[in-house]
Amino acid sequence: MSRVPDAAERRCGMDVGITGKDAGFTSKDVGSTGLDLGFIGLGVMGRPMALNLARAGTPLVVWNRTPGRCDPLREAGAHIAGSPAEVFARAGTVILMLADESAVDAVLGRGTPDFTARVAGHTVVHMGTTSAEYSAGLRDAVRAAGGRYVEAPVSGSRVPAEQGRLVAMLAGEPDAVAAVRPLLAPMCGETFACGDVPGALLMKFSVNLFLITLVTGLTEAFHFAGRHGLDQGLLRAVLDAGPMASAVSRGKAAKLVARDFDVQAAAADVLKNNRLIAEAARKAEVATPLLDVCHALFGETVAQGRGTEDMVAVLRALESRTGA
Ligand SMILES: NC(=O)c1ccc[n+]([C@@H]2O[C@H](COP(=O)([O-])OP(=O)(O)OC[C@H]3O[C@@H](n4cnc5c(N)ncnc54)[C@H](OP(=O)(O)O)[C@@H]3O)[C@@H](O)[C@H]2O)c1
C-alpha cells in the first residue's frame, strides 16, 4: 500500500500515482529519493516551467548544460544536480525540455551504456518538439531498456509558460500518462491525452499549423494595409473588435503596429516547427499548401539574420518580396 502523501506532494498531484511503487517500479529502481521529480533543460521555456513546479512545492532536481541558468531554481528551492546521471539517480520521473533531438540523445547518453543505466525503471517525459519518428524511436528504446516513456509537447510560448498556462498534449501507455498528467498541473492550464506515441506530437503539429498560418496571414494583412497607406492602429482596432480576435491575434497585432520584434516565439524555432510539420505531411502524402508558403517565408526571414526575432519578423520577408 502507498504511504499517505505529505502536503507538498498533494499540492503537486503526487497523490495520484507517482510513487515509484505506484508507477510499477520498486524503490530500488527509482533510487532512494525517487519521489523527486527531475527536470532537464532550463531554456526559454524550461526555466519558467521548472520554476512553476518548484514554487508549487514539487520536490525538484534540475540540471542544465549551462550551469548559470540553474540559479533561479536554486533560489526557488530545487536541488541542482551536477549531471544528468545525478538527476536520474534522484528522480523516478524526469521531464526533458530540450532544444532538439541531439540534445535529448546527449542528455540520455543514447548509444552508450549510460542510456540503460539512466532510463531503466524511470519514466522519461519528453516535452520539447522533435519529429514524430524520433519520438516513436525513443519510446521503443526507453521501453527496451526497461523504462517508460510519455510524449508531452506543449502549445504556448514564454509568457504562458511563465503564467503556468501551457496546454500539454500527452501520449503513451495510459497508466504512464495518468501518472504524469497531474505532475504537469503547475505548468499547464489544460492537459489532453492523445493516445499512443506519437499522437501528441502530431496533435501539436496540427495546432502549430494553424498558429503559423494564422500569424503569417495576420502579418500579411498588416503589410497589405501599410502599403495601401492605411492606419495600422485602426486595422488593429477593427480586428480586435471583430469575430476573429484571439489572444494570439491581439498580441501579434500590437507587435506589428509597433514594429516590435522582441522574441516571444523565435522565427528560427517557428521555421524548425514548420519543417517538422512539412516533413510529417510529406511522409503521409498530405497536401499543406498554406504551410508550404509559410515555410518559404520563414526560411527567407531566417536567411536575413532574423532568426532570433519574434515570428512577426516574417514581415521582413514580405517586405523584401514587395521590394522597397
Ligand atoms: N520557445 C517556444 O515558444 C516553444 C514553445 C513550445 C515548444 N517549444 C519547444 O520546446 C523546446 C525547448 O524550447 P526553448 O524555447 O526552451 O529552447 P531554448 O531556450 O533554446 O533551450 C534549449 C535547452 O536545451 C538545452 N540544450 C541544447 N543542446 C543541448 C545539448 N547538446 N546538451 C544538453 N542540453 C542542451 C539548452 O541548454 P543551454 O542552456 O546550455 O543552452 C537549453 O536548456 C524546443 O524543442 C522547442 O521547439 C518552444
Image: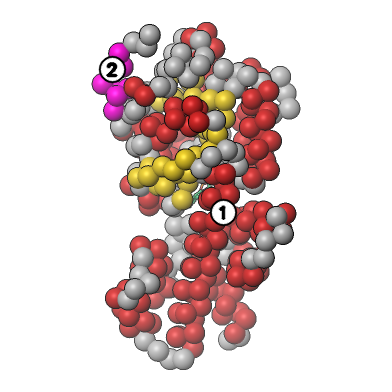
- In terms of image quarters, where does ligand 1 lie? top right
From the viewer's side, name the closer residue of 109 and 214: 214
Distance between the Cα atoms at labels 1 and 2? 38 Å
Q: List the single residue furthest toward the left.
A: 7
Residue 63 visible = no
Relative to 119, 279 lies left or right: right
The residue at 42%/22% (across/down) is 18
Report which residue position mark 2 lands on.
6
Identified at 68% across, 23% down, the residue is 144
**Callout 2: few (<14), some (14-19), or many (20+) C-alpha neighbours within 10 Å?**
few
Mark linked to residue 205: 1
Question: Which mark, by number, is residue 85?
Answer: none
Q: Is residue 10 shown in magenta?
A: yes
Q: Position of residue 28 (x, y in %)?
A: 52, 8
Three-letter amino acid code of the residue under disc 2: Asp
Q: Where residue 253 appears, x then y in whole percent?
A: 39, 72
Indicate the secondary structure of the residue bearing disc 2.
loop
Residue at 64% in and 46% down: 131
Residue 123 seen: yes
The front one of 319 and 280 is 280
Q: Quadrant of residue 270?
A: bottom right
Q: Are marks 1 and 2 in contact (CB under 8 Å)?
A: no
* Amino acid at pointer 1: Phe
Tell me the magenta residue range: 4-11
Across and down, in percent, residue 10 comes to 29, 24
Magenta stretch contains residue 150? no
Q: Residue visible at 55% across and 61% down? A: 209
